[in-house]
Image (spheres, rainbow, N blue to C red):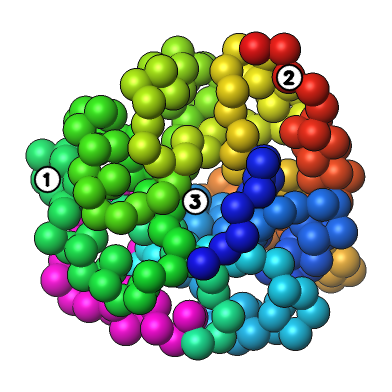
Amino acid sequence: MEQTKPTCLEVCVDSFASAMAAVRGGADRLELCSCLLVGGLTPDVALLEQIRRESDIPIRCLMRPRFGDFLYAPEEIQLMELQIPRLASAGATGFVIGCLTSEGRLDRQSMERLVRAAGGRNLTLHRAFDVSRDAEEAMADAARLGIDTILTSGQAADCWSGRACLGQLLEAGAPLEIMAGGGVGAEVIRKLRALYPLRTFHMSGKVTLPSAMGFRREGVPMGLPGLDEFSIWQTSEDHVRAAAHALQEEISC
């Protein structure tokens, strides 16, 4: 189990360079994924091992087998069940999970399988929560499953827009840690903590870096239409450091 701290800044990363920038910037924990451009997918074990050779920071691995919704086929649940122990053996301290039914409720049966596979490690319910039918019901189900953290933007496009819902979750005496995510930076942390006693935040702190490619064949896309093949998304050490400092400031709420 991870050590409990008064506050926690979790940084979502999908590369070794981003992970090291987050560590240098003062992150308390990483959420490790791949392909952050599509919201994140399950990371490769080798990437986790690479990071572990350089840092002992707590790392929760995202379990998401594909882009798209959170209604998973039996084979996709089985895949995540197989991946979790391998990532745990490579140094994952926790996992980030979420499955929904077609009606928009937590798929408790599928999630129970993932919870068992995690073997008592820390668990976050990811933003499947934000597209669920009923926030209070989903929170209660998550608590019964043994999840300790909910990552949420307050069921809105970003956590500042969803601040009223965040406040309601906190006022309801949530038995889990409410981790605000979606559009988080130093200024949003200050604004939200002036309203509510939030202790835990999730950010990517990403910036766009130009490719070092000299020769560029334009007009041959390799992925989603509209994406710039010659731009690299990477976590900014400075953005993380600014957010970490904001989280340590005295709160007025």
Q: Are marks 3 and 1 in contact (CB under 8 Å)?
A: no
In magenta, the rendered stretch is: 66-88
Q: Badge 2, how many Cα within 10 Å: few under 14, some, many 20+? A: some
- The structure residue drawn at horizontal position 52% and vertical position 38%, both measured from the top left corner, is 179
Circle 3 residue: 39
Disc 1: which residue:
102
Secondary structure under badge 3? loop
Which callout, 2 or 1, points at the residue further toward the start of the chain? 1
Q: Is residue 68 left or right of residue 73?
A: right
Residue 182 higher or lower than 173, as above or below: below
What residue is shown at x 85% (from left), y 44% (from top)? 241
Mark 3 → mark 1, Cα distance in angstroms: 20 Å
* Residue in front for this viewpoint, 199 or 214: 199
The disc labelled 2 sits on which kind of residue? Answer: Ile
Distance in Å between CA atoms under marks 2 and 1:
41 Å
Residue 37 appears anywhere in the view: yes
The percent coordinates of residue 8 (x first, y second) are 66, 45
In reply to whether residue 82 is colored magenta, the answer given is yes
For discs 2 and 3, the disc positioned in front in the rendered view = 2
Q: Residues within 10 Å of mark 1 (few under 14, many from 20)?
A: few
The vertical placement of 28 against 172, above or below, is below
**Residue 253 is drawn in which quadrant?**
top right
In the rendering, at what x and y percent does residue 124 appear?
A: 43, 53
Q: Nearer the viewer, residue 247 or 235?
A: 247
Q: Secondary structure at mark 1?
A: loop
- Residue type at mark 3 is Gly
